[in-house]
Image (spheres, helix red, strand yellow):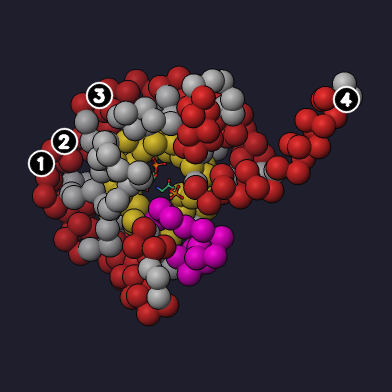
Amino acid sequence: MPTLGVNIDHIATIRQARRTVEPDPVAAAVLAELAGADGITVHLREDRRHIQDRDVLLLRQTVRSHLNLEMAATDEMVRIALDIKPDYVTLVPEKREEVTTEGGLDIAGQTARIGEIVDKLQSAGIPVSLFIDAQDAQIEASVKVKAQFIELHTGQYAEAKEEKSRQQELALLAHGCEQAIKAGLRVNAGHGLTYWNVYPVAALPGMEELNIGHTIISRAALVGIERAVREMKQAIQGL
Ligand SMILES: CC(=O)[C@@H](O)[C@H](O)COP(=O)(O)O
Ligand SMILES: NCC(=O)COP(=O)(O)O
């Protein structure tokens, strides 16, 4: 069974809604690790809409499992990664206006540029994962640029409305996972996975790590609300 990387971006989304200090993703990472998270994932977006530079700095010092820094393939982000040295970096595509990541990174269309970044980071001891769609051309290009890992984008699988299309997307992920492992890549997956759709992806042979965020933070908000209200009632009573 794959390990679980918990993406805590949306703890920071709640904090940034008020530009205040709570909830702190650093505290969330500690609690996630105490609950069994095998890794902590954060996406430092270029627009800093949720995770901030300060979060990544502190997480580097506090995370006891491993820290996966998701980032765009830009010079600024490469500088930050070389400075902070996360346990691994996942290169992801980024569009300023998107609500969330909309697809895999096109490695095949920019092998020279991505190859240069992979080399810079891996030469500094930071393994690189490439967030890609499960397509043969992208897998072949990921081998070509010498990345150690890929992360298969599970968004289309997660968003499939009908069982038939979900099964088709799952078959593509299964094929991609098998091809990538055969080619010597290590395989992670993530995006849009939920408590209801995770198992078939987790069961793919050779899958190493699933990065899951939004559904865990959503559930945490709901399963924690009773205690949060009880504690406020007590606080009002001076208890
Ligand atoms: C790359 C990926 O699939 C997710 O990590 C996603 O990009 C997280 O970023 P947001 O939390 O901003 O959606
Ligand atoms: N790379 C995927 C990730 O980190 C979490 O994505 P999501 O579960 O928040 O959709």
The answer for how far apart the CA atoms under marks 2 and 1 are is: 6 Å
The disc labelled 2 sits on which kind of residue?
A: Glu
Badge 3 marks a residue whose secondary structure is helix
The disc labelled 3 sits on which kind of residue?
A: Glu
Report if residue 192 lies within the magenta region.
yes
Q: Earlier in the sequence, mark 4 or mark 3?
A: 3
Badge 4 marks a residue whose secondary structure is loop
Q: Position of residue 93 (x, y in %)?
A: 25, 43
The answer for how far apart the CA atoms under marks 4 and 3 are is: 50 Å
The answer for how far apart the CA atoms under marks 2 and 3 are is: 14 Å
| Rendered position, 174 above or below 207 | below
The disc labelled 4 sits on which kind of residue?
A: Gln
Asked if marks 2 and 1 touch (Cβ < 8 Å), the reply is: yes
Horizontal relation, residue 3 to residue 138: left or right = right
Badge 1 marks a residue whose secondary structure is helix
Task: Please tell me whether mark 4 or mark 1 is closer to you in this view.
Answer: 4
Residue depicted at 40% across the width and 75% down the height: 162
Q: Position of residue 55 (x, y in %)?
A: 47, 24
Q: Which residue is mark 4?
A: 237
Residue 136, by quadrant, is bottom left
Horizontal relation, residue 105 to residue 199: left or right = left
Residue depicted at 50% across the width and 63% down the height: 198
Residue depicted at 63% across the width and 45% down the height: 220
Task: Please tell me whether mark 4 or mark 2 is closer to you in this view.
Answer: 4
Q: Which residue is mark 2?
A: 116
Numbered label attached to residue 112 = 1
Span colored in magenta: 187-203
Q: Earlier in the sequence, mark 2 or mark 3?
A: 3
Q: Which residue is mark 3?
A: 76
Asked if marks 4 and 3 touch (Cβ < 8 Å), the reply is: no
